[in-house]
Image (tube, rainbow, N blue to C red):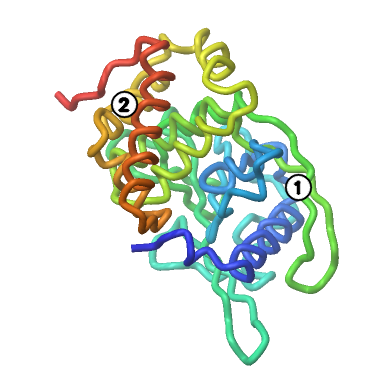
Amino acid sequence: MVIRYDYGKKEVETCLSVLVELMTILGEFRDNIVLVGGWIPYFLMEENRHEHVGSLDIDIALDFQKISGDTYKTILQILKSRGYEKGKQPFIFYRTIPTENNGNITVEVDLLTGEYGGTGKSHRTQSIQDVRARKARGCDLVFKQNCLLKISANMPDGALNEVTVKIATVIPFLVMKGMCIWDRYKEKDAYDIYFTILHYPGGVNELVKIFQPFKSNKLVREGLGKIKAKFKDIDAPGPVWLINFEDIDDKEEKERVKRDAYERVNAFLDTLGIEEFKER
């Protein structure tokens, strides 16, 4: 089990360094790339950024319908030329960065894309130039609901660089997290969901205002319904995975955090009229 204390300062900083490098080398495609996944709460909640653990990997969504094959270098050529190694899965790449004392930190980069259009339902990937990106449920939302953010960090070569990146806004982020927490056992999903609802500027009332116009969208209702299912009571997976990720020892504090997660998440979802998702 990966917990908060596995997110070491050096590892998180290295991942951020690779993120800036990645968005630098893929600059030609930047208009059609959106950052998703575990970095989003860190960047969206600017005032509470110091409280979030960050991420140890990078998820980027590629808009396969808009990325042209007519480029000087392909995505694969660019990645390989900068030391990114392809994993066993065609949509995963690894960037290994040397550290002091002859060590290494390896950052995983996942290429994601939308489900609709392109290959049929039986295929789990879409072709984009000479790479394949994994279809992620809810990812189609992110290409219309994103915002621009300037990210600055020292790249692996030591250069301090700033890049402008499209990042998922809160709607596609929570929808995609709902899909994730339903399909896998990863404690950080619960942490990211709770952190976002706890710290979003303006609180639950502001989140409700943002989601209200989209609550009839099928993907939105499904993603939020899956969050509802995982936070449906105090001892449901969501609250329990949250305290496990936080590695809380004190029994009273465990119960307090679980209850707060249950009540806060459900206050948001109940106001929107979201029902628990159930598979047919």
Q: Quadrant of the N terminus?
A: bottom left
31 or 123: which is nearer to us? 31
In percent of width and height, residue 71 lies at: 72, 49
What residue is disc 2 on? 228
What residue is disc 1 on? 28
Q: Residue at x 42, y 21 (%)?
A: 220
Q: Quick check: can you spot residue 220?
A: yes
Question: As shown in the figure, which amino acid type bears the numbered disc 1?
Answer: Glu
Q: Residue at x 53, y 61 (%)?
A: 56
Question: As shown in the figure, which amino acid type bears the numbered disc 2?
Answer: Lys
SS at badge 2:
helix
Q: Give the CA distance from mark 2 to mark 1.
A: 39 Å
In percent of width and height, residue 111 lies at: 51, 50
Identify the mark nearer the N-term, 2 or 1.
Answer: 1
Image side of residue 159 versus residue 238, left or right: right
Question: Which residue, as the protein is rendered here, is positioned at the far bottom?
Answer: 101
In percent of width and height, residue 17 lies at: 70, 63
Q: Residue at x 76, y 55 (%)?
A: 24
103 or 268: which is nearer to us? 268
In percent of width and height, residue 136 lies at: 41, 39
Answer above or below: position of 250 versus 156: above
